[in-house]
Amino acid sequence: MTDLRLPTFDDVLAAEARQKGVVRETPVLTHAALDEAAGAELFVKAECLQVTGSFKIRGAMNRLAQIPPEGKKAGVVAFSSGNHAQGVARAARLLGMPALIVMPADAPAVKVEGVRADGGEVYLYDRNAESREEISARLAAERGAVVVPSYDDFDIIAGQGTAGLEFARQAEAMGKPLDYLICCAGGGGLINGVALAFERLSPATRIWAAEPEGHDDWTRSLEAGEILANAPGTRSICDAILTPEPGILTFALGQRLLSGGLRVSDDEVRHAMRMAFRYLRIVGEPGGCAALAAALKGVPAEMKGKRVGILVTGGNVDAAQYADILSTGT
C-alpha cells in the first residue's frame, strides 16, 4: 500500500471550492439528555440535513466536476444502495450529464425515488446473486460512461472530507474543540476524508468508526492490521453502510488516521433514531445513526466526560419504517 496515491488535506480544500454553491453547511446540535445518556459532551453534526439528505453530495460533486467536457455527454454510472446514488444523480443534473445508477432491488423506496426525481436512470439488481461492480463496468463500457465508485476513490474521499473541515471549524468557533469523533463506516470514504481534515485542523481529536454488529469489517481490520471482509449474507437495518470490506485507499488512510471501531446492534440504532427525533428534532436513517447509537449505549471509558463529535450522516429512511421505529421502544 506504500505506492498508493492518497488524498491529502490540500485535496479536501480543493474539493470545498468545487462544491461552492451546491453543498450547504450543516448545523452542530447539542442536548443535555444525550450527554447524560452517553456519559460525555456530544456535538452532533446533522448531515441528514444536507442536500439530497446525506453527505454523499460532497464526494459526488467533487468527482463529477472534474470530468472533462468531452466526457460529459456519455455521463456516469454509479452503484449504491441509495445515498451515493442520490448524490451522483443530483450532481449529474447540476452539471448537465446523464447518470445511470445500479441499485439493489431491496433498496429503500425513498432512495430509488430520489434518484429518479433528479433525472437519474435506475438499474435494479439482486445483491445476493449479482455483482454490482461487474454490472456497472459492463454498462459503463456499453455507454462509454465514467464509473463513479461510492467510496474507494481519490476524489470521492477528498469530497467527503469537507464535512470534516466544517465540523472542526464549527467546534473551534464554539470554543469546544473535539477530543473524539465517532463516524459510521461503510466503505470508509467519509470517515477517512473527515479524518484528513481533522488531522490538520484538530490533530488531537481521535477518530473512531461505528458499525453494525456482525458487519464490523473496519473494527476487525484495524485490529488485525489488514483488510478483513464481512461474512457473505450478513444483514442489518443499516443498509447505507453494508459494504463488503474496507476499500484499498480508505484502509491505507484508516491505518494512519483511525483509532478503532465500535459495534452497535440494530436495537441500539433504533433507539438512537428515536433519541435524535425526540431531542434534536432531526430524521436519521439507520446507517446514519450508527455513530449516535455507539455513543448513546455509553461511550468507552477513555471518552467519559470528554467532548465527542458525532456525525448523523443521512436521513433517507422510508416513512413506514421510520414510523414503526418511532412508535416502538422507549
Image (tube, helix red, strand yellow):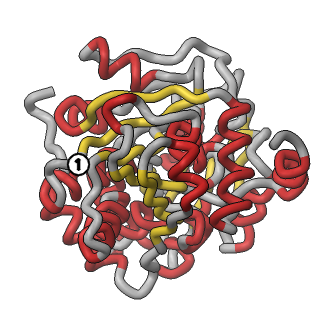
* Residue placed under numbered mark 1 in the picture: 205
What is the x, y in percent for residue 51? 56, 74
Would residue 327 be found to the left or right of residue 26 on screen?
Answer: right
What is the x, y in percent for residue 210? 47, 35
Would residue 259 be found to the left or right of residue 239 on screen?
Answer: left
Q: Secondary structure at mark 1?
A: loop
Residue 98 or residue 291, whichever sits in front:
291
Would residue 261 be found to the left or right of residue 4 on screen?
Answer: right
Would residue 218 be found to the left or right of residue 12 on screen?
Answer: right
- Residue at (83% x, 46% y) in the render: 325
- Number of numbered discs present? 1
Quadrant in which the N terminus appears: top left
- Residue at (36% x, 77% y) in the render: 19
- Residue at (36% x, 41% y) in the render: 152
Tell me the quarter of the picture where residue 232 sits: top right
Q: Is residue 77 visible?
A: yes
Q: Callout 1, which amino acid? A: Thr
* Figure check: 105 above or below 202: above
- For the residue carrying disc 1, how many other residues have a C-alpha within 10 Å: few (<14), some (14-19), or many (20+)? many
Q: Kindly give the residue lying farthest to the bottom in the view shown.
A: 21
What is the x, y in percent for residue 317? 74, 54
Q: Is residue 67 visible?
A: no
What is the x, y in percent for residue 217? 45, 22
Quadrant in which the C terminus appears: top right
Residue 290 or residue 30, whichever sits in front:
30
- Residue at (31% x, 16% y) in the render: 223
Residue 178 or residue 70, whichever sits in front:
178
